[in-house]
């Protein structure tokens, strides 16, 4: 099935890619982990609420290609390059593609804050954390307990807040796009 995107679809995808890329500069490191607290995860969740699953997948793959393969400084903290994708936090990056595509699949067809919030929290957080855990365990050669402390526990509260913010914004953006 050959499905093409309309100019409006492409514009939405480009805007989401731009928002994700710029939001990656809103980041701060934590002293006990190579992972950073980043605003880009909220932007990715918003992307999942605004785009279709296929559009979300393509947008996030483009983000990884531009930031990881092409080396543009659009990954968290304004970094880029293959080293980021293959380093201790690389699992987060690949998990983002899977997690937020799934969020887009399960967000439903109604523009609903509660549904968006639940999809963001219940689907994205476990998938993203699993990716981060795997890469930290493999790259840093640490145990599951240390990986939980570095890849999951410090981020749960903030990630829930970011999912709620993305759901709030997603409802408003979708309403604006319909008019």
Image (spheres, grey):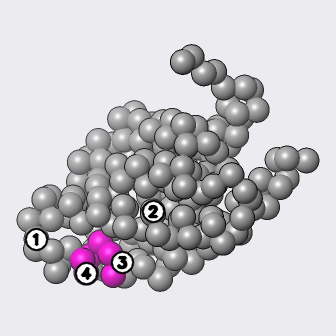
Residue drawn at point x = 47 percent, y = 52 percent: 102
In the picture of the structure, the residue carrying the numbered disc 2 is 124
Residue stretch rendered in magenta on the structure:
148-153
Rendered position, 86 above or below 167: above
Decide which of 172, 27 is in the foreground and name it: 172
Which of the two marks, 1 or 3, is nearer to us in this view?
1
In the picture of the structure, the residue carrying the numbered disc 1 is 142
Left or right placement of residue 84 versus residue 123 in this view: left
Which of the two marks, 2 or 4, is nearer to us in this view?
2
Image coordinates of residue 112 in percent, x first then y, are: 72, 64
Decide which of 97, 1 is in the foreground and name it: 1
Q: Cα distance, mark 2 to mark 3?
A: 21 Å
Q: Cα distance, mark 2 to mark 4?
A: 19 Å
Rendered position, 106 above or below 137: above
Image coordinates of residue 125 in percent, x first then y, are: 42, 68
**Who comes first in sequence, dot 1 or dot 2?**
2
């Amino acid at each position: 099935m050959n499905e093409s995107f309309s100019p409006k679809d492409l514009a939405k995808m480009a805007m989401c890619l731009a928002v994700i890329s710029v939001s990656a500069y809103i980041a701060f490191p934590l002293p006990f982990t190579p992972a950073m607290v980043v605003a880009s995860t909220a932007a990715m969740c918003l992307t999942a609420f605004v785009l279709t699953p296929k559009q979300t997948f393509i947008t996030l793959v483009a983000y990884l290609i531009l930031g990881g393969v092409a080396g543009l400084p659009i990954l968290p903290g304004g970094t880029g390059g293959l080293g980021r994708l293959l380093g201790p936090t690389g699992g987060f990056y690949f998990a983002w593609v899977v997690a937020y595509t799934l969020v887009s699949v399960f967000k439903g067809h109604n523009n609903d804050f509660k549904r968006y919030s639940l999809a963001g929290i219940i689907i994205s957080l476990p998938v993203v954390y699993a990716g981060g855990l795997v890469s930290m365990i493999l790259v840093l050669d640490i145990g599951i307990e240390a990986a939980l402390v570095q890849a999951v526990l410090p981020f749960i509260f903030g990630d829930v807040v970011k999912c709620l913010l993305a759901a709030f914004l997603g409802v408003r953006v979708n309403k604006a796009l319909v008019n």
